[in-house]
Protein backbone atom coordinates (compact mmCIF):
# COMPACT_ATOMS: atom_id res chain seq x y z
CA UNK A 1 0.00 0.00 0.00
CA UNK A 2 1.28 3.46 -0.79
CA UNK A 3 2.51 5.62 2.06
CA UNK A 4 -0.57 7.48 3.25
CA UNK A 5 -0.77 10.50 5.49
CA UNK A 6 -3.67 12.57 6.75
CA UNK A 7 -4.01 16.23 5.90
CA UNK A 8 -3.96 18.01 9.27
CA UNK A 9 -5.23 21.31 7.83
CA UNK A 10 -8.75 19.90 7.61
CA UNK A 11 -9.07 17.31 10.41
CA UNK A 12 -12.84 17.03 9.99
CA UNK A 13 -12.49 15.66 6.45
CA UNK A 14 -9.28 13.66 7.13
CA UNK A 15 -8.26 13.78 3.49
CA UNK A 16 -5.80 10.98 2.63
CA UNK A 17 -2.50 12.05 1.05
CA UNK A 18 -0.33 9.59 -0.90
CA UNK A 19 3.41 9.73 -1.44
CA UNK A 20 4.99 8.72 -4.74
CA UNK A 21 8.26 6.78 -4.41
CA UNK A 22 10.15 3.92 -6.02
CA UNK A 23 7.78 1.35 -4.53
CA UNK A 24 4.69 3.29 -5.61
CA UNK A 25 5.49 4.94 -8.98
CA UNK A 26 3.10 7.09 -10.96
CA UNK A 27 3.64 8.64 -14.41
CA UNK A 28 1.30 11.64 -14.55
CA UNK A 29 1.90 12.49 -18.23
CA UNK A 30 1.21 8.92 -19.40
CA UNK A 31 -1.85 8.71 -17.14
CA UNK A 32 -3.52 11.90 -18.35
CA UNK A 33 -2.64 11.53 -22.06
CA UNK A 34 -5.69 9.42 -23.15
CA UNK A 35 -8.26 11.90 -21.80
CA UNK A 36 -9.83 14.97 -23.35
CA UNK A 37 -12.26 17.65 -22.27
CA UNK A 38 -13.51 18.27 -18.77
CA UNK A 39 -12.49 14.87 -17.40
CA UNK A 40 -8.84 15.95 -17.74
CA UNK A 41 -9.42 18.79 -15.27
CA UNK A 42 -11.43 16.59 -12.89
CA UNK A 43 -8.69 13.98 -12.78
CA UNK A 44 -5.91 16.54 -12.36
CA UNK A 45 -7.79 18.14 -9.45
CA UNK A 46 -8.03 14.72 -7.79
CA UNK A 47 -4.26 14.27 -8.21
CA UNK A 48 -3.54 17.76 -6.82
CA UNK A 49 -5.60 16.97 -3.73
CA UNK A 50 -4.21 13.48 -3.07
CA UNK A 51 -0.59 13.72 -4.31
CA UNK A 52 0.99 17.01 -3.19
CA UNK A 53 4.44 15.92 -4.41
CA UNK A 54 3.31 16.23 -8.06
CA UNK A 55 0.67 18.93 -7.51
CA UNK A 56 2.71 21.67 -9.26
CA UNK A 57 3.09 19.57 -12.39
CA UNK A 58 -0.63 18.67 -12.27
CA UNK A 59 -1.51 22.35 -11.90
CA UNK A 60 0.59 23.24 -14.95
CA UNK A 61 -1.11 20.55 -17.04
CA UNK A 62 -4.53 21.70 -15.85
CA UNK A 63 -3.89 25.28 -17.02
CA UNK A 64 -2.71 23.98 -20.38
CA UNK A 65 -6.03 22.18 -20.87
CA UNK A 66 -8.25 24.90 -19.36
CA UNK A 67 -7.85 27.15 -22.40
CA UNK A 68 -9.43 24.46 -24.58
CA UNK A 69 -12.68 24.61 -22.57
CA UNK A 70 -15.31 27.29 -22.16
CA UNK A 71 -15.79 27.15 -18.38
CA UNK A 72 -13.76 29.93 -16.72
CA UNK A 73 -15.00 28.91 -13.26
CA UNK A 74 -12.63 25.92 -13.46
CA UNK A 75 -9.73 28.34 -13.01
CA UNK A 76 -10.86 29.17 -9.46
CA UNK A 77 -11.65 25.51 -8.77
CA UNK A 78 -8.17 24.33 -9.76
CA UNK A 79 -6.41 27.16 -7.92
CA UNK A 80 -8.55 26.55 -4.82
CA UNK A 81 -7.63 22.85 -4.78
CA UNK A 82 -3.94 23.68 -5.11
CA UNK A 83 -3.94 26.39 -2.44
CA UNK A 84 -5.67 24.08 0.06
CA UNK A 85 -2.74 21.69 -0.32
CA UNK A 86 0.38 23.79 -0.96
CA UNK A 87 -0.59 27.44 -0.57
CA UNK A 88 -0.23 30.11 -3.25
CA UNK A 89 0.16 29.11 -6.90
CA UNK A 90 1.71 32.32 -8.23
CA UNK A 91 5.19 30.79 -8.52
CA UNK A 92 3.80 27.89 -10.63
CA UNK A 93 1.23 29.40 -13.03
CA UNK A 94 -0.37 32.75 -13.73
CA UNK A 95 -4.01 33.39 -14.53
CA UNK A 96 -4.76 34.75 -18.00
CA UNK A 97 -7.30 37.40 -17.02
CA UNK A 98 -7.94 38.44 -20.61
CA UNK A 99 -8.87 34.89 -21.58
CA UNK A 100 -11.24 34.60 -18.62
CA UNK A 101 -12.98 37.87 -19.54
CA UNK A 102 -13.19 36.96 -23.21
CA UNK A 103 -14.66 33.52 -22.57
CA UNK A 104 -17.12 34.93 -20.04
CA UNK A 105 -18.25 37.55 -22.56
CA UNK A 106 -18.72 34.93 -25.29
CA UNK A 107 -20.68 32.70 -22.91
CA UNK A 108 -23.03 35.54 -21.97
CA UNK A 109 -23.66 36.35 -25.64
CA UNK A 110 -24.24 32.69 -26.51
CA UNK A 111 -26.62 32.19 -23.60
CA UNK A 112 -28.64 35.26 -24.54
CA UNK A 113 -28.89 34.09 -28.13
CA UNK A 114 -30.06 30.57 -27.15
CA UNK A 115 -32.61 31.86 -24.64
CA UNK A 116 -34.06 34.26 -27.23
CA UNK A 117 -34.37 31.40 -29.72
CA UNK A 118 -36.17 29.27 -27.13
CA UNK A 119 -38.57 32.08 -26.32
CA UNK A 120 -39.30 32.67 -30.02
CA UNK A 121 -39.96 28.99 -30.71
CA UNK A 122 -42.15 28.73 -27.62
CA UNK A 123 -44.27 31.67 -28.74
CA UNK A 124 -44.61 30.14 -32.23
CA UNK A 125 -45.43 26.69 -30.75
CA UNK A 126 -42.96 24.90 -33.01
CA UNK A 127 -42.54 21.64 -31.12
CA UNK A 128 -39.43 20.27 -32.83
CA UNK A 129 -37.67 23.64 -32.64
CA UNK A 130 -38.50 23.94 -28.93
CA UNK A 131 -36.97 20.52 -28.31
CA UNK A 132 -33.79 21.43 -30.18
CA UNK A 133 -33.58 24.75 -28.32
CA UNK A 134 -33.76 22.99 -24.95
CA UNK A 135 -31.14 20.50 -26.15
CA UNK A 136 -28.80 23.29 -27.27
CA UNK A 137 -29.22 25.12 -23.96
CA UNK A 138 -28.50 21.89 -22.08
CA UNK A 139 -25.29 21.40 -24.10
CA UNK A 140 -24.31 25.01 -23.46
CA UNK A 141 -24.83 24.89 -19.69
CA UNK A 142 -23.02 21.56 -19.50
CA UNK A 143 -19.99 23.02 -21.30
CA UNK A 144 -19.95 26.00 -18.94
CA UNK A 145 -20.19 23.86 -15.80
CA UNK A 146 -23.77 24.77 -14.81
CA UNK A 147 -24.92 21.18 -14.42
CA UNK A 148 -28.19 21.95 -12.66
CA UNK A 149 -29.43 24.13 -15.53
CA UNK A 150 -28.14 21.60 -18.07
CA UNK A 151 -30.16 18.82 -16.44
CA UNK A 152 -33.22 21.09 -16.30
CA UNK A 153 -33.16 21.76 -20.05
CA UNK A 154 -32.35 18.16 -20.99
CA UNK A 155 -35.32 16.86 -19.00
CA UNK A 156 -37.53 19.70 -20.25
CA UNK A 157 -36.85 18.62 -23.84
CA UNK A 158 -38.56 15.31 -23.03
CA UNK A 159 -41.96 17.04 -23.20
CA UNK A 160 -41.32 17.92 -26.85
CA UNK A 161 -39.90 14.60 -28.06
CA UNK A 162 -41.98 13.12 -30.87
CA UNK A 163 -39.93 10.01 -31.74
CA UNK A 164 -38.05 7.28 -29.92
CA UNK A 165 -34.81 8.63 -31.37
CA UNK A 166 -35.42 11.98 -29.67
CA UNK A 167 -36.02 10.26 -26.31
CA UNK A 168 -32.88 8.18 -26.77
CA UNK A 169 -30.79 11.27 -27.56
CA UNK A 170 -32.13 13.01 -24.46
CA UNK A 171 -31.35 10.03 -22.23
CA UNK A 172 -27.80 9.73 -23.57
CA UNK A 173 -27.18 13.43 -22.89
CA UNK A 174 -28.43 13.07 -19.30
CA UNK A 175 -26.27 9.96 -18.78
CA UNK A 176 -23.14 11.77 -19.97
CA UNK A 177 -23.98 14.58 -17.57
CA UNK A 178 -24.49 12.11 -14.70
CA UNK A 179 -21.09 10.54 -15.36
CA UNK A 180 -19.39 13.93 -15.28
CA UNK A 181 -21.19 14.77 -12.02
CA UNK A 182 -20.55 11.26 -10.66
CA UNK A 183 -24.23 11.08 -9.76
CA UNK A 184 -24.44 7.27 -9.78
CA UNK A 185 -27.89 6.91 -8.21
CA UNK A 186 -29.42 8.97 -11.04
CA UNK A 187 -28.10 6.68 -13.76
CA UNK A 188 -30.26 3.49 -13.69
CA UNK A 189 -33.60 5.21 -14.32
CA UNK A 190 -32.32 6.88 -17.49
CA UNK A 191 -30.62 3.68 -18.62
CA UNK A 192 -33.98 1.89 -18.50
CA UNK A 193 -35.67 4.76 -20.37
CA UNK A 194 -32.95 4.65 -23.03
CA UNK A 195 -33.28 0.87 -23.36
CA UNK A 196 -37.03 1.24 -23.87
CA UNK A 197 -36.50 3.86 -26.58
CA UNK A 198 -33.81 1.72 -28.21
CA UNK A 199 -36.13 -1.30 -28.23
CA UNK A 200 -38.84 0.78 -29.89
CA UNK A 201 -36.38 1.90 -32.54
CA UNK A 202 -35.27 -1.69 -33.12
CA UNK A 203 -38.85 -2.91 -33.56
CA UNK A 204 -39.68 -0.01 -35.89
CA UNK A 205 -36.59 -0.69 -37.97
CA UNK A 206 -37.46 -4.39 -38.22
CA UNK A 207 -40.99 -3.62 -39.35
CA UNK A 208 -39.71 -1.13 -41.93
CA UNK A 209 -37.22 -3.67 -43.31
CA UNK A 210 -40.04 -6.19 -43.77
CA UNK A 211 -42.46 -3.72 -45.36
CA UNK A 212 -39.95 -2.06 -47.72
CA UNK A 213 -39.15 -5.10 -49.94
CA UNK A 214 -42.81 -6.04 -50.30
CA UNK A 215 -43.77 -2.48 -51.29
CA UNK A 216 -40.91 -2.36 -53.79
CA UNK A 217 -41.99 -5.64 -55.41
CA UNK A 218 -45.59 -4.48 -55.81
CA UNK A 219 -44.78 -0.95 -57.02
CA UNK A 220 -45.68 0.17 -60.55
CA UNK A 221 -43.15 -0.69 -63.29
CA UNK A 222 -41.52 2.55 -64.58
CA UNK A 223 -42.36 3.75 -68.06
CA UNK A 224 -39.99 2.32 -70.67
CA UNK A 225 -39.81 -1.15 -69.04
CA UNK A 226 -41.87 -4.22 -69.61
CA UNK A 227 -43.40 -6.23 -66.79
CA UNK A 228 -40.77 -8.87 -67.32
CA UNK A 229 -38.07 -6.34 -66.56
CA UNK A 230 -36.68 -5.85 -70.10
CA UNK A 231 -36.08 -2.35 -71.45
CA UNK A 232 -38.32 -1.21 -74.37
CA UNK A 233 -35.96 1.55 -75.41
CA UNK A 234 -33.81 1.08 -78.45
CA UNK A 235 -30.70 1.99 -76.48
CA UNK A 236 -31.13 -0.96 -74.13
CA UNK A 237 -31.54 0.86 -70.82
CA UNK A 238 -31.14 -0.44 -67.29
CA UNK A 239 -33.38 -3.36 -66.39
CA UNK A 240 -35.91 -3.17 -63.57
CA UNK A 241 -34.28 -6.16 -61.86
CA UNK A 242 -30.96 -4.31 -61.65
CA UNK A 243 -32.72 -1.28 -60.14
CA UNK A 244 -34.36 -3.52 -57.56
CA UNK A 245 -31.01 -5.10 -56.79
CA UNK A 246 -29.32 -1.75 -56.22
CA UNK A 247 -32.20 -0.61 -54.03
CA UNK A 248 -31.89 -3.84 -52.03
CA UNK A 249 -28.16 -3.26 -51.60
CA UNK A 250 -28.77 0.25 -50.28
CA UNK A 251 -31.40 -1.11 -47.88
CA UNK A 252 -29.01 -3.76 -46.57
CA UNK A 253 -26.23 -1.22 -46.02
CA UNK A 254 -28.67 1.05 -44.19
CA UNK A 255 -29.79 -1.81 -41.98
CA UNK A 256 -26.18 -2.74 -41.27
CA UNK A 257 -25.39 0.84 -40.27
CA UNK A 258 -28.41 0.99 -37.97
CA UNK A 259 -27.39 -2.31 -36.37
CA UNK A 260 -23.90 -0.94 -35.73
CA UNK A 261 -25.35 2.20 -34.15
CA UNK A 262 -27.57 0.09 -31.90
CA UNK A 263 -24.57 -1.96 -30.79
CA UNK A 264 -22.67 1.22 -29.94
CA UNK A 265 -25.56 2.63 -27.91
CA UNK A 266 -26.11 -0.69 -26.12
CA UNK A 267 -22.44 -0.87 -25.15
CA UNK A 268 -22.59 2.68 -23.80
CA UNK A 269 -25.67 1.82 -21.73
CA UNK A 270 -24.00 -1.30 -20.35
CA UNK A 271 -20.90 0.72 -19.43
CA UNK A 272 -22.78 3.49 -17.66
CA UNK A 273 -24.86 0.93 -15.72
CA UNK A 274 -21.66 -0.89 -14.69
CA UNK A 275 -20.20 2.41 -13.52
CA UNK A 276 -23.37 3.04 -11.53
CA UNK A 277 -23.01 -0.33 -9.78
CA UNK A 278 -19.39 0.49 -8.96
CA UNK A 279 -20.33 3.90 -7.62
CA UNK A 280 -23.00 2.42 -5.33
CA UNK A 281 -20.75 -0.39 -4.06
CA UNK A 282 -22.46 -3.31 -5.84
CA UNK A 283 -19.14 -4.84 -6.89
CA UNK A 284 -20.50 -8.19 -8.07
CA UNK A 285 -23.01 -6.52 -10.40
CA UNK A 286 -20.34 -4.07 -11.55
CA UNK A 287 -17.92 -6.90 -12.37
CA UNK A 288 -20.53 -8.81 -14.37
CA UNK A 289 -21.54 -5.67 -16.28
CA UNK A 290 -17.96 -4.58 -17.07
CA UNK A 291 -17.01 -8.05 -18.28
CA UNK A 292 -20.00 -8.08 -20.69
CA UNK A 293 -18.99 -4.90 -22.51
CA UNK A 294 -18.39 -4.87 -26.25
CA UNK A 295 -15.07 -3.82 -27.80
CA UNK A 296 -13.68 -0.32 -27.04
CA UNK A 297 -14.59 1.11 -30.44
CA UNK A 298 -18.29 0.63 -29.62
CA UNK A 299 -17.99 3.27 -26.90
CA UNK A 300 -17.38 5.82 -29.65
CA UNK A 301 -16.73 9.38 -28.51
CA UNK A 302 -16.96 8.38 -24.83
CA UNK A 303 -13.42 7.01 -25.10
CA UNK A 304 -11.22 9.82 -23.85
CA UNK A 305 -14.09 12.20 -23.12
CA UNK A 306 -15.47 10.17 -20.20
CA UNK A 307 -13.31 7.08 -19.77
CA UNK A 308 -10.24 5.30 -21.13
CA UNK A 309 -10.03 1.57 -21.99
CA UNK A 310 -7.42 1.16 -19.25
CA UNK A 311 -9.97 2.42 -16.70
CA UNK A 312 -12.46 -0.25 -17.74
CA UNK A 313 -9.75 -2.92 -17.44
CA UNK A 314 -8.96 -1.80 -13.89
CA UNK A 315 -12.59 -1.40 -12.78
CA UNK A 316 -13.70 -4.77 -14.15
CA UNK A 317 -10.68 -6.71 -12.89
CA UNK A 318 -10.69 -5.34 -9.34
CA UNK A 319 -14.45 -5.84 -8.97
CA UNK A 320 -14.18 -9.39 -10.34
CA UNK A 321 -11.31 -10.41 -8.05
CA UNK A 322 -13.08 -8.91 -5.04
CA UNK A 323 -16.57 -10.34 -5.56
CA UNK A 324 -16.69 -13.25 -8.03
CA UNK A 325 -15.77 -16.88 -7.32
CA UNK A 326 -12.65 -18.26 -8.93
CA UNK A 327 -14.57 -20.25 -11.56
CA UNK A 328 -16.45 -17.13 -12.66
CA UNK A 329 -13.21 -15.14 -12.87
CA UNK A 330 -11.80 -17.74 -15.25
CA UNK A 331 -14.95 -18.02 -17.38
CA UNK A 332 -15.88 -14.32 -17.57
CA UNK A 333 -12.48 -12.61 -17.36
CA UNK A 334 -9.59 -14.91 -18.31
CA UNK A 335 -11.41 -16.61 -21.20
CA UNK A 336 -13.02 -13.38 -22.44
CA UNK A 337 -11.36 -12.28 -25.71
CA UNK A 338 -13.22 -8.95 -25.83
CA UNK A 339 -12.23 -7.87 -22.33
CA UNK A 340 -8.66 -8.87 -23.19
CA UNK A 341 -8.55 -5.87 -25.55
CA UNK A 342 -9.12 -3.62 -22.52
CA UNK A 343 -6.51 -5.43 -20.41
CA UNK A 344 -3.92 -4.88 -23.14
CA UNK A 345 -4.06 -1.16 -22.29
CA UNK A 346 -2.76 -1.84 -18.75
CA UNK A 347 -0.05 -4.56 -18.66
CA UNK A 348 -0.02 -4.78 -14.87
CA UNK A 349 -3.69 -5.82 -14.89
CA UNK A 350 -2.79 -8.91 -16.92
CA UNK A 351 0.01 -9.70 -14.46
CA UNK A 352 -2.48 -9.30 -11.60
CA UNK A 353 -4.95 -11.75 -13.15
CA UNK A 354 -2.23 -14.28 -13.98
CA UNK A 355 -0.87 -14.17 -10.42
CA UNK A 356 -4.38 -14.64 -9.02
CA UNK A 357 -5.11 -17.66 -11.21
CA UNK A 358 -1.68 -19.15 -10.28
CA UNK A 359 -2.48 -18.67 -6.56
CA UNK A 360 0.56 -16.42 -6.21
CA UNK A 361 -1.20 -14.18 -3.73
CA UNK A 362 1.92 -12.37 -2.56
CA UNK A 363 2.42 -11.10 -6.11
CA UNK A 364 -1.27 -10.14 -6.27
CA UNK A 365 -0.98 -8.00 -3.16
CA UNK A 366 2.36 -6.54 -4.27
CA UNK A 367 0.86 -5.45 -7.61
CA UNK A 368 -2.10 -3.85 -5.82
CA UNK A 369 0.27 -1.98 -3.50
CA UNK A 370 2.60 -0.88 -6.30
CA UNK A 371 -0.28 0.59 -8.32
CA UNK A 372 -2.21 2.01 -5.38
CA UNK A 373 -1.53 5.61 -6.49
CA UNK A 374 -3.24 4.88 -9.81
CA UNK A 375 -6.26 3.45 -8.01
CA UNK A 376 -6.51 6.08 -5.27
CA UNK A 377 -6.40 9.03 -7.66
CA UNK A 378 -9.07 7.76 -10.06
CA UNK A 379 -12.20 9.89 -9.87
CA UNK A 380 -14.57 6.90 -9.98
CA UNK A 381 -12.51 4.26 -8.16
CA UNK A 382 -10.74 6.16 -5.36
CA UNK A 383 -13.59 5.97 -2.83
CA UNK A 384 -13.84 2.19 -3.32
CA UNK A 385 -10.14 1.30 -3.48
CA UNK A 386 -9.74 0.56 0.28
CA UNK A 387 -12.81 -1.71 0.32
CA UNK A 388 -11.86 -3.52 -2.91
CA UNK A 389 -8.30 -4.04 -1.66
CA UNK A 390 -9.60 -5.42 1.64
CA UNK A 391 -11.95 -7.82 -0.16
CA UNK A 392 -9.14 -9.07 -2.40
CA UNK A 393 -6.94 -9.62 0.70
CA UNK A 394 -9.73 -11.66 2.28
CA UNK A 395 -10.22 -13.72 -0.89
CA UNK A 396 -6.47 -14.41 -0.99
CA UNK A 397 -6.52 -15.70 2.59
CA UNK A 398 -9.56 -17.90 2.01
CA UNK A 399 -8.17 -19.41 -1.22
CA UNK A 400 -4.73 -19.99 0.32
CA UNK A 401 -6.16 -21.89 3.31
CA UNK A 402 -8.71 -23.89 1.31
CA UNK A 403 -6.46 -26.95 0.51
CA UNK A 404 -5.15 -27.31 4.09
CA UNK A 405 -6.49 -28.85 7.27
CA UNK A 406 -3.83 -27.15 9.39
CA UNK A 407 -1.36 -24.43 8.49
CA UNK A 408 1.04 -22.37 10.53
CA UNK A 409 0.36 -18.64 10.58
CA UNK A 410 4.06 -18.05 10.04
CA UNK A 411 3.87 -19.93 6.75
CA UNK A 412 0.80 -17.93 5.69
CA UNK A 413 2.56 -14.69 6.58
CA UNK A 414 5.54 -15.66 4.45
CA UNK A 415 3.32 -16.62 1.50
CA UNK A 416 1.33 -13.37 1.66
CA UNK A 417 4.13 -10.99 2.64
CA UNK A 418 2.50 -9.96 5.93
CA UNK A 419 3.48 -10.11 9.58
CA UNK A 420 2.21 -12.98 11.75
CA UNK A 421 0.15 -10.58 13.86
CA UNK A 422 -1.52 -9.15 10.76
CA UNK A 423 -2.35 -12.61 9.44
CA UNK A 424 -3.79 -13.66 12.79
CA UNK A 425 -5.95 -10.56 12.99
CA UNK A 426 -7.30 -11.06 9.46
CA UNK A 427 -7.92 -14.79 9.97
CA UNK A 428 -9.84 -14.20 13.22
CA UNK A 429 -12.03 -11.67 11.42
CA UNK A 430 -12.75 -14.12 8.60
CA UNK A 431 -13.61 -16.88 11.08
CA UNK A 432 -16.01 -14.58 12.89
CA UNK A 433 -17.56 -13.62 9.56
CA UNK A 434 -18.00 -17.26 8.52
CA UNK A 435 -15.61 -17.03 5.54
CA UNK A 436 -13.19 -19.56 7.10
CA UNK A 437 -14.50 -22.59 9.00
CA UNK A 438 -11.84 -23.27 11.59
CA UNK A 439 -10.13 -22.02 14.74
CA UNK A 440 -6.82 -20.36 15.61
CA UNK A 441 -4.41 -21.80 18.15
CA UNK A 442 -3.05 -18.51 19.49
CA UNK A 443 -0.29 -20.18 21.48
CA UNK A 444 0.99 -22.41 18.71
CA UNK A 445 0.11 -19.89 15.97
CA UNK A 446 -1.69 -22.54 13.94
CA UNK A 447 -4.90 -22.28 11.95
CA UNK A 448 -6.88 -25.53 12.18
CA UNK A 449 -9.81 -26.29 9.88
CA UNK A 450 -12.92 -27.61 11.46
CA UNK A 451 -13.04 -31.33 10.81
CA UNK A 452 -16.11 -32.45 8.97
CA UNK A 453 -17.42 -36.01 9.15
CA UNK A 454 -18.84 -36.40 5.66
CA UNK A 455 -20.43 -39.76 6.45
CA UNK A 456 -22.26 -38.28 9.42
CA UNK A 457 -23.38 -35.32 7.32
CA UNK A 458 -24.69 -37.63 4.61
CA UNK A 459 -26.51 -39.81 7.17
CA UNK A 460 -28.06 -36.75 8.85
CA UNK A 461 -29.18 -35.37 5.50
CA UNK A 462 -30.73 -38.73 4.55
CA UNK A 463 -32.59 -38.95 7.88
CA UNK A 464 -33.89 -35.41 7.46
CA UNK A 465 -35.20 -36.19 3.96
CA UNK A 466 -36.82 -39.41 5.24
CA UNK A 467 -38.54 -37.51 8.06
CA UNK A 468 -39.87 -34.91 5.63
CA UNK A 469 -41.15 -37.61 3.26
CA UNK A 470 -42.89 -39.39 6.18
CA UNK A 471 -44.65 -36.17 7.22
CA UNK A 472 -45.78 -35.53 3.64
CA UNK A 473 -47.14 -39.08 3.25
CA UNK A 474 -49.04 -38.83 6.53
CA UNK A 475 -50.69 -35.61 5.35
CA UNK A 476 -51.67 -37.23 2.03
CA UNK A 477 -53.18 -40.27 3.79
CA UNK A 478 -55.15 -38.04 6.16
CA UNK A 479 -56.55 -36.06 3.24
CA UNK A 480 -57.56 -39.21 1.39
CA UNK A 481 -59.43 -40.53 4.46
CA UNK A 482 -61.22 -37.21 4.97
CA UNK A 483 -62.35 -37.23 1.34
CA UNK A 484 -63.58 -40.81 1.68
CA UNK A 485 -65.60 -39.82 4.76
CA UNK A 486 -66.96 -36.71 2.95
CA UNK A 487 -65.52 -34.42 5.63
CA UNK A 488 -64.04 -31.92 3.20
CA UNK A 489 -65.15 -28.28 3.59
CA UNK A 490 -66.08 -27.02 0.13
CA UNK A 491 -65.77 -23.52 -1.29
CA UNK A 492 -69.03 -21.59 -0.62
CA UNK A 493 -69.10 -20.26 -4.18
CA UNK A 494 -68.75 -23.76 -5.59
CA UNK A 495 -71.47 -25.04 -3.24
CA UNK A 496 -73.82 -22.24 -4.30
CA UNK A 497 -73.24 -22.95 -8.00
CA UNK A 498 -73.95 -26.66 -7.46
CA UNK A 499 -77.14 -25.76 -5.54
CA UNK A 500 -78.35 -23.45 -8.32
CA UNK A 501 -77.55 -26.12 -10.88
CA UNK A 502 -79.61 -28.62 -8.91
CA UNK A 503 -82.57 -26.24 -8.79
CA UNK A 504 -82.41 -25.73 -12.57
CA UNK A 505 -82.41 -29.46 -13.15
CA UNK A 506 -85.33 -29.94 -10.73
CA UNK A 507 -87.41 -27.21 -12.38
CA UNK A 508 -86.71 -28.67 -15.80
CA UNK A 509 -87.88 -32.11 -14.70
CA UNK A 510 -91.08 -30.65 -13.21
CA UNK A 511 -91.90 -28.78 -16.40
CA UNK A 512 -91.47 -31.92 -18.41
Image (cartoon, rainbow, N blue to C red):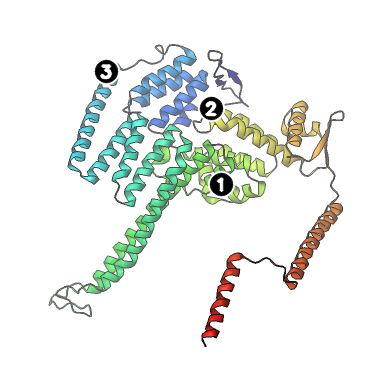
Tally the numbered discs.
3
Locate the N terminus by quadrant.
top right
Nearer to us: label 2 or label 1? 1
Q: Residues within 10 Å of mark 2 (few under 14, many from 20)?
A: some
Residue 296: tell me if it is visible.
no
Q: CA distance from mark 2 to mark 1?
A: 29 Å
Disc 1 and disc 3 in contact, CB within 8 angstroms:
no
* Residue at the image position 63 percent from the left and 43 percent from the top: 354
Question: Is 463 located above or below residue 178 in the figure?
Answer: below
Foreground: 52 or 113?
113
Comes first in the chain, label 2 or label 1: 2
> Where does residue 332 sit, x and y in percent of width and height?
59, 50
Image quadrant assignment for residue 130? top left
Q: Real-space Cα distance between discs 2 and 3?
A: 35 Å
Q: Residue at x 78, y 28 (%)?
A: 420
- Mark 1: which secondary structure? helix
Image point (45%, 14%), residue name:
83
From the image, tell me which residue sits under label 3: 98
Query: Which residue does the numbered mark 1 point to in the structure image?
Result: 288
Amino acid sequence: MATMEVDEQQPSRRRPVFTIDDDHPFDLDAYIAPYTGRTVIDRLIAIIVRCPSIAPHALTLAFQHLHRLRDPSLVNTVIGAYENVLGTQEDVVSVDVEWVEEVTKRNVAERTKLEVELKTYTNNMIKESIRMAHRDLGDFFRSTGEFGLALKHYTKSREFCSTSQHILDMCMSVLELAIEQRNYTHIPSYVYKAEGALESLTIGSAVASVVAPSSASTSQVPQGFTAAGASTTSGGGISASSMAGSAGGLSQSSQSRKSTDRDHIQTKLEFVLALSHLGTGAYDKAATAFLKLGPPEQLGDWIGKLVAPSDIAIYGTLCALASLPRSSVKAQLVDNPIFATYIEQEPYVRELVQAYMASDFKTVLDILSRNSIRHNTDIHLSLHTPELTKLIRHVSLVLYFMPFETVRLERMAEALGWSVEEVEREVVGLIQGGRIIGRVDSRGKVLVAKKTDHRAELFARAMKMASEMEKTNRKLLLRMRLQQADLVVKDPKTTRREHDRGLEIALGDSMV
